[in-house]
Amino acid sequence: MANKHYDINYLQNSRRLLLNLKEHSYTFFQKINSGTIIDLGCGAGNDVIELAKITGKDVKVIGIDHDPVMLQQAKEQSKEVSNVDFILSEAYPLPFGDETISGLRTERVIQHLTNPEQVIGEVSRILKKDCPLVIIETDWSSLSFYTKFVDVQKKVNAYYTDVKINNGFAAAKLVSYLQQNNFRNIQFEIHPFVTDNLKTANELFKIEQMITEAAEKGHIREEDGRAFTDALQKADDGHYFACSVNLVIASCIK
Ligand SMILES: C[S@@+](CC[C@H](N)C(=O)[O-])C[C@H]1O[C@@H](n2cnc3c(N)ncnc32)[C@H](O)[C@@H]1O
């Protein structure tokens, strides 16, 4: 994303809302009992800690992130956990030798990359043969609010996918990234996320802020932005607010 829209607070809120999906993603790694697992773009490190819990003390779980503030928080929260480590690094290149890693998870990171193909190639380079790769992404193009302002909604979605997010169609492209690198046993799951209140939609998607930004930058007309926002507010007040988005998981082995 050109200007990051997430901070530690955002990650903690979204973690609470996406807990089931996250827990499901850990199960792909539960049979690994030695070696190193990486959480790429680990943010505040919660998933690193949870992966370390399920894999046991003979597995080292390493969180990688290029943001020192995130890693500082990750280190703070994992003080008591022995088998975790954190490395400040870009997603490309990764500071590991060829075929040295036993599993890799990456959640809501590929969407932010300007070089996703290069990063997936790098992941393929460091993963050992037969080891799992699990990618979670948001399908921003599926974001829906079920109001009559369908044309405004389309333009707001385009603001997410084409302007705000570097790789806004990452979810749709995941399988092709994996195929390009000859990953095997590719599986694709869709996990719809649904909320019935505007507060949660703002926490997870910052929808009101995005409408305002899209209007300020001329992607939608000011009056259309206001009408869409009013419709969302009215739906929330009337207890018929509805919002959904698909999160996807692409899993495979090298
Ligand atoms: C939306 S957050 C998701 C964090 C975490 N995976 C989670 O689910 O809570 C994206 C994370 O990826 C990191 N990130 C984005 N681009 C990166 C890059 N090129 N190299 C390393 N980390 C990156 C960000 O700093 C941020 O912590």
Image (cartoon, rainbow, N blue to C red):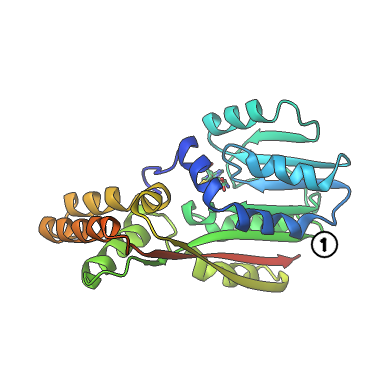
Residue flagged by tag 1: what amino acid is it?
Answer: Lys
Q: Which residue lies at the image location 27% right of the left edge and 66% below the top edge?
A: 153
The image quadrant of residue 149 is bottom left
Q: Does 187 sit left or right of 232 as displayed?
A: right
The image quadrant of residue 81 is top right
- Whether residue 95 can be seen here: no
Residue 91, image x, y percentages = 59, 46
Residue 43, image x, y percentages = 57, 40
Q: Which residue lies at the image location 69% right of the left edge and 73% below the top edge?
A: 186
Q: Which residue lies at the image location 62% right of the left edge and 32% below the top edge?
A: 74
Q: Does 32 sit left or right of 90 as displayed?
A: right
- Label 1 secondary element: loop
The residue lying toward the viewer, choosing from 100 and 59, is: 59
Q: Quadrant of ligand 1?
A: top right
- Whether residue 44 can be seen here: yes
Question: Mark 1: few, some, or many residues within 10 Å (few <14, many ≥20)?
Answer: some
Q: Does 9 sit left or right of 94 as displayed?
A: left
Residue 117, image x, y percentages = 56, 61
* Residue position for label 1: 129
Residue 76, image x, y percentages = 64, 25
Q: Which residue lies at the image location 71% right of the left edge and 47% below the top edge?
A: 38
| Placement of the C terminus among the 4 image quadrants | bottom right
Q: Is residue 151 above or below residue 89?
A: below
The residue lying toward the viewer, choosing from 62 and 241, is: 241
